[in-house]
């Protein structure tokens, strides 16, 4: 059935962790809700899977995605063994999306699983209708992140919504804690206007440096608070917010 909602590309960034990736894919099938999703696997040169099957990692994942999303597509980067190209891998997925005339994508790394239902219609509605917003974090808040509560209505989906608009100076110069990952590459949903303003992700570097470099560019940009901004969802005006929509598998292993 055709949808009048903007198509959202779910960029599934992965490298080698086949079992964890399959678990995460299962969580997306079960919990991610939106009327028009296109899944695309962004593989940073995994080669053979680590599940003992001898099959290519990307082939195993593509087979699983197609069980519920038959039009899933994929690419594999020619990244040499032992090197990283996290930014180039994601940038390539974004470029493929743009070539299809779409503007909104959700980035999900292979070890970040959804734990409960997440309806992204309010997020998409805000990104689609509010040009001052470019990026919405989907992971938890971290120490040092500071901002101001704002209201953006999402009348087509859940109605009035409260969001935390991240403020650069408050997050990096407060006396209690600071955050080096304002532009967090943990799960997020973004509009291409964010990259048109601040550029693409740095290529040929490991994931942490990819995040911190983009954060530094965002913080130092002449646009300041006048460019496309970062939001963190708080929830509907009539209810308490539920954080923890997504959790990194590594945190559970550490806790155990």
Image (tube, rainbow, N blue to C red):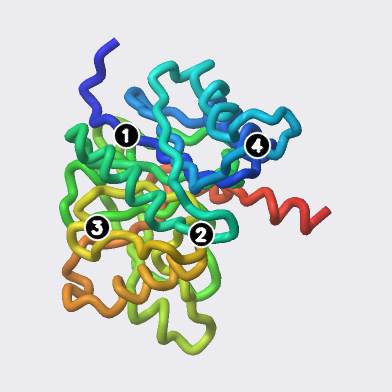
Observer-nearest residue: 153 or 103? 103
Residue 229 lies in quadrant: bottom left
Instruction: Choose mark 4 or mark 3, whichever is in front.
Output: 4
- Label 2 vs 1, first from the N-terminus: 1
> Residue beneath label 2, please?
84
Within-10-Å neighbours for mark 2: few <14, some 14–19, many 20+: some
Q: Position of residue 143 (x, y in %)?
A: 55, 72
Marks 2/4: CA distance? 17 Å
Observer-nearest residue: 1 or 91? 91
> Residue beneath label 4, please?
49
Instruction: Choose mark 1 or mark 3, whichever is in front.
Output: 3
- Label 3 vs 2, first from the N-terminus: 2
Describe the element under mark 1 as helix, strand or loop: strand
Query: Residue reaching furthest top?
Result: 1
Q: Position of residue 83 (x, y in %)?
A: 54, 60
Describe the element under mark 2 as helix, strand or loop: loop
Q: Residue at x 22, y 36 (%)?
A: 102
Circles 1 and 3, Cβ within 8 Å, touching? The answer is no
């Amino acid at each position: 059935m055709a949808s009048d909602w903007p198509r959202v590309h779910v960029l599934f960034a992965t490298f080698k962790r086949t079992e964890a990736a399959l678990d995460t894919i299962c969580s997306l099938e079960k919990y991610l809700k939106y009327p028009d999703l296109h899944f695309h696997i962004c593989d940073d040169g995994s080669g053979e899977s680590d599940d003992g099957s001898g099959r290519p990692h990307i082939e195993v994942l593509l087979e699983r995605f197609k069980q519920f999303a038959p039009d899933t597509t994929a690419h594999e980067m020619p990244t040499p063994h032992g090197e990283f190209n996290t930014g180039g891998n994601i940038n390539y997925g974004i470029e493929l999306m743009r070539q299809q005339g779409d503007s909104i994508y959700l980035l999900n790394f292979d070890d970040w699983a959804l734990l409960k239902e997440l309806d992204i219609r309010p997020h998409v509605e805000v990104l689609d209708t509010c040009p001052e917003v470019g990026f919405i974090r989907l992971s938890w808040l971290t120490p040092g992140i500071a901002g101001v509560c704002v209201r953006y209505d999402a009348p087509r989906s859940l109605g009035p919504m409260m969001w935390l608009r991240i403020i650069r100076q408050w997050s990096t110069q407060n006396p209690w804690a600071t955050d080096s990952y304002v532009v967090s590459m943990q799960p997020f949903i973004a509009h291409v206007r964010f990259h048109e303003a601040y550029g693409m992700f740095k290529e040929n570097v490991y994931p942490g440096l990819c995040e911190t470099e983009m954060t530094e560019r965002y913080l130092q940009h002449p646009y300041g608070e006048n460019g496309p901004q970062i939001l963190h969802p708080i929830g509907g005006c009539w209810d308490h917010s539920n954080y923890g929509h997504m959790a990194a598998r590594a945190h559970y292993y550490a806790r155990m």
